[in-house]
Each structure stands twice: as C-alpha cells, then as structure tokens.
Image: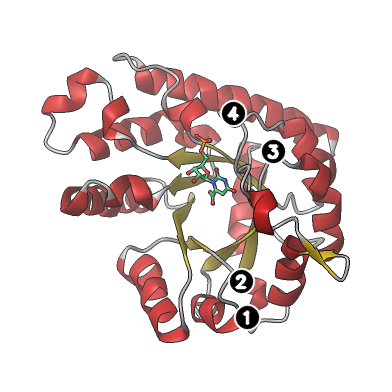
C-alpha cells in the first residue's frame, strides 16, 4: 500500500487509529475455547466490530509465535481476512526484527511476500545493511524503532554522544539509507515531550505511536507536536480496545472503545483543519 492511500483512509474515516491484535489465548472469552481456531475467531470478531473507525491493524507476532504452528496459521488467516474484506486497511507485522543483510532479506520476504503485510517493525541496532533489505520492497513500509514506550528505553535510546541522543541518531542516520522514503518510525506515546525533537529531524515521516490506553499515553499530548499537514501519525491501542470486555459482548465493547478513540481523533483533525 502507498502512503497516499493510507492518508486518504485517515481523511475518510477521520481516524488515525491502529488496533493492536495482541491476542492472548489466556484472555479470550470462554465461549471461544471450543472453536477450531479461537485466535482467528477472536480477531475476526474484533476486526468486524472496529474496521469502520480503524485505518491499521497491528498483530504483534509474539502472541502468535507463542502458540506454535496454530498461532502462525491464525496470523496468516488474520492478515488474509483483512486483505480480502477490508483491503483499504494498512497492516503491520509487529515483529521487531533485525539481523545481517542476507537474514534481513529473509525476514522481509517472510512478512511482505509470504504473509502479505504492508509493513513490519524493525530494530535499528545492527544498522544500514540490516534495514536496507526491508526498504528494497516497493510499496512496503519499514517501521524502525526510534524512541520506544517502555521504561527501558532510557537505558540506551535517551543516552547521548556528542549531545545527540541515540534515538536522534537513529532518525538522522536512517534517513540516509537507500529507499529511506519507505521508512516510518516508532515513537512511544509515553514520551510526548520528545515529539518536538523527533519532528525537527523527520518533519514528514509517519510515526507509529504505541502506548495510548494501557500504558497511559495521552493522545492530545502526542498530537500537539506529532501531527503534520499530512497527519503523519498512526496511534496504536491494543489491550484498551481488544480486551474492553471479557464477556460474550467483547466485540461490541471493542467497537465502542475504538469509536471513543476515533471521536477524540476526529476532534483533533477537525481542529487542525484536516
Ligand atoms: O512496536 C511497537 O508496536 C511497540 C513499540 C513500543 O515502543 N511500545 C509498544 O508498546 N509497542 C507495541 O505496541 C503494543 C502496545 O500494546 P498496549 O499497551 O496493550 O496498547 C504492543 O504490541 C507492544 O509490543
């Protein structure tokens, strides 16, 4: 998918919501336990209930890998279901991969060509040759971890050398990579005070912003400096949406939680004249 198609969706839906499909078998409603593929059934119900206010879905691959073959199959069926039924919605494989060039090439093929995702999250630690194999795929986005939402982000990402924080170095250096136009960045909602610095380096790049909801990040704070003329933001919520209820009405409650976030987004976009 091309970025202008994502932007078009955001404008149509008045939403830059990404729903994280972090489907934990321990948290599924009991009545799904007897289903052939409970993970897929859960995802399908969540997708059907939230798609009208959602512009991206982000399955976190760990939740599927933890279930072995069955989990991998549920992941494949989930991305297929989105593509077949809601082809306008952007898909993100949250896999946080990163390895030497020939291995990175295999990861890129696995998520882009085999599973058919539009984008994948990648760790920048191993540098240029570990990222460029992902960037070589046309019309696919590579979402590089810049400043993550977790407390441990302070260990390395905020550390400075020559007055430049590591996350700033990641943003600056990665912009010199071949096909850098296919880059997006992860910047956590829990660190809104850094968005101004991020935007100085990457004024137009799309940012995937996790950390709203269960991690306590504020949508309004993120948008203050994060929002661009082209929107430039995908804000993710996983647990706050998909586990809004653990009862049989879980999908309906997920739809309501997603709608609430979208209303906030609509107001922000309207105020910004977008
Ligand atoms: O790459 C990510 O999506 C990610 C980066 C980050 O800095 N923080 C972060 O929470 N995430 C992911 O975003 C999701 C957040 O989930 P909730 O806290 O339940 O909304 C999880 O899948 C995390 O793995």
Instruction: Classify residue 69 as left or right of residue 107.
Output: left
Q: Is residue 170 visible?
A: yes
Give the residue at x 31% y 36%: 44
Q: Mark 2 highlights which residue?
A: 182
Asked if the residue at tag 2 contacts the one at tag 1, i.e. Cβ–Cβ closer than 8 Å, the answer is yes
Q: Which mark is residue 179?
A: 1
Of the residues under marks 2 and 4, which one precedes in the sequence? 2
- CA distance for labels 2 and 4: 28 Å
Percent of width and height locating residue 101: 46, 84
Q: Mark 4 highlights which residue?
A: 213
Of the residues under marks 4 and 1, which one precedes in the sequence? 1
Per the image, label 3 sits on a secondary structure element best described as loop
Instruction: Classify residue 207 as left or right of residue 159.
Output: left
Snapshot quadrant of residue 124: bottom right
Percent of width and height locating residue 218: 72, 31
Of the residues under marks 3 and 2, which one precedes in the sequence? 2
Q: Nearer the viewer, residue 67 or 114?
A: 67
Instruction: Classify residue 182 as left or right of residue 222.
Output: left
Instruction: Classify residue 206 as left or right of residue 102.
Output: right
Asked if the residue at tag 1 contacts the one at tag 4, i.e. Cβ–Cβ closer than 8 Å, the answer is no
Give the residue at x 17% y 48%: 70
Give the residue at x 49% y 81%: 133
- CA distance for labels 3 and 2: 25 Å
- CA distance for labels 1 and 2: 6 Å
Per the image, label 4 sits on a secondary structure element best described as loop
Of the residues under marks 1 and 3, which one precedes in the sequence? 1
Tell me the crowding category of disc 4: few under 14, some 14 to 19, or many 20 or more residues within 10 angstroms, Cα based. Answer: some
């Amino acid at each position: 998918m091309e970025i202008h198609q994502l932007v078009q969706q955001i404008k149509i839906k008045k939403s830059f919501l990404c729903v994280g499909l972090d489907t934990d078998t321990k948290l599924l409603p009991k009545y799904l336990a007897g289903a052939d593929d409970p993970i897929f059934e859960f995802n399908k119900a969540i997708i059907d209930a939230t798609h009208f206010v959602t512009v991206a879905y982000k399955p976190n691959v760990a939740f599927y890998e933890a279930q072995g073959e069955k989990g991998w199959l549920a992941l494949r069926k989930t991305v297929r279901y989105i593509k077949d039924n809601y082809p306008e919605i952007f898909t993100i494989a949250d896999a946080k991969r990163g390895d030497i060039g020939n291995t990175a090439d295999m990861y890129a093929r696995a998520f882009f060509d085999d599973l058919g995702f539009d984008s994948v999250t990648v760790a920048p630690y191993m540098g240029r040759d570990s990222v460029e194999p992902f960037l070589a795929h046309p019309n696919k986005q590579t979402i590089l971890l810049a400043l993550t939402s977790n407390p441990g982000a302070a260990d390395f990402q905020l550390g400075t050398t020559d007055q430049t924080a590591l996350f700033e170095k990641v943003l600056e250096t990665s912009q010199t990579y071949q096909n850098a136009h296919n880059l997006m960045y992860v910047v956590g909602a829990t660190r809104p005070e850094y968005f101004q610095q991020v935007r100085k380096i990457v004024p137009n790049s799309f940012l995937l912003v996790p950390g709203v909801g269960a991690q306590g990040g504020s949508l309004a704070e993120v948008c203050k400096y994060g929002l661009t003329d082209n929107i430039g933001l995908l804000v993710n919520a996983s647990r706050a949406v998909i586990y809004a209820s653990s009862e049989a009405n879980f999908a309906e409650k997920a739809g309501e939680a997603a709608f609430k976030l979208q209303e906030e987004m609509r107001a922000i976009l309207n105020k910004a004249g977008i």
